[in-house]
Image (cartoon, rainbow, N blue to C red):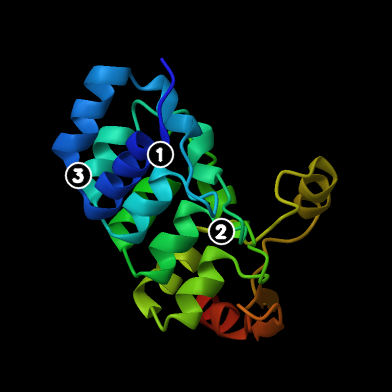
Amino acid sequence: MSLNDDEKDDLLLACRYGDLEDVQAFVKQYGSTPLADIRDDNKNCMLHMVCANGHIDLLNYLLPILPPSMLSVQNTSGSTPLHWAALNKHLDIAQKIVQHPEGPGLDLIDVKNTAGHSPLGEAELAGWEEGAKWFVEVMNLDPEQGSKEQDEDDATLDDGVGRDIEVEIEDADGQIAKMTISGANVDEASKSS
């Protein structure tokens, strides 16, 4: 059965306004298969609407019936539903999306839109410290993680006591912030014990 534009628009509006009953009625009538293909004129999907507006109950209903690939759908601006959750400061939504066991997981935090912003960047631009902090806490800060060569090199080093650690973090504007965490305090503390 083919859906007309009004039916698609009604479903997107139900997602935008958090009308769980209307979405459930749609799924009962048409099944969950057409949900993945419905977009607005800007290529926003249902999850963009749900995540932008913080409808956790609707997200909980949709995640088990939508293909996991929906979590990484990008609109015409290259933004994912996670970008919209970050822009609108919805921590419970952001956590649910990133932690969805079948989804892309932490990789979603690194997706950049056409403005060059990741969800972390959007959180920073929105002044949402709580969300930015959470993204940094859970994100993969070592893109070379898992490299066998790196693991072998690390295995030949000492226990690291007393060594300085260099950290690089990319901000919302793509600038790299470098900082060194001194291992001297750790070394002195271990000598005194």
Q: In this figure, which residue is indicated by the disc labeled 2?
A: 79
Q: In this figure, which residue is indicated by the disc labeled 3?
A: 57
The picture quadrant where one finds residue 154 is bottom right
Q: Position of residue 92 (x, y in %)?
A: 28, 56
Lower sequence index among marks 2 and 1: 2
Q: Nearer the viewer, mark 3 or mark 1?
A: 3
Q: CA distance from mark 3 to mark 1?
A: 15 Å
Lower sequence index among marks 3 and 1: 3
Residue 147, placed above or below residue 42: above
- Mark 3: which amino acid? Asp
- Mark 2: which amino acid? Ser
Neighbor class of circle 3 (other Cα within 10 Å; few <14, some 14-19, many 20+) is few
Is residue 52 rendered to the left or right of residue 39? left
Q: CA distance from mark 2 to mark 3?
A: 22 Å
Is residue 55 rendered to the left or right of residue 32? left
The mark found on residue 100 in the picture is 1
Q: CA distance from mark 2 to mark 1?
A: 18 Å
Of 110 and 181, nearer the camera is 110
Q: Nearer the viewer, mark 2 or mark 1?
A: 2
Neighbor class of circle 1 (other Cα within 10 Å; few <14, some 14-19, many 20+) is some
Residue 193, can we see it?
no
Q: Position of residue 8 (x, y in %)?
A: 38, 37
Residue closest to the far top: 1
Lower sequence index among marks 2 and 3: 3
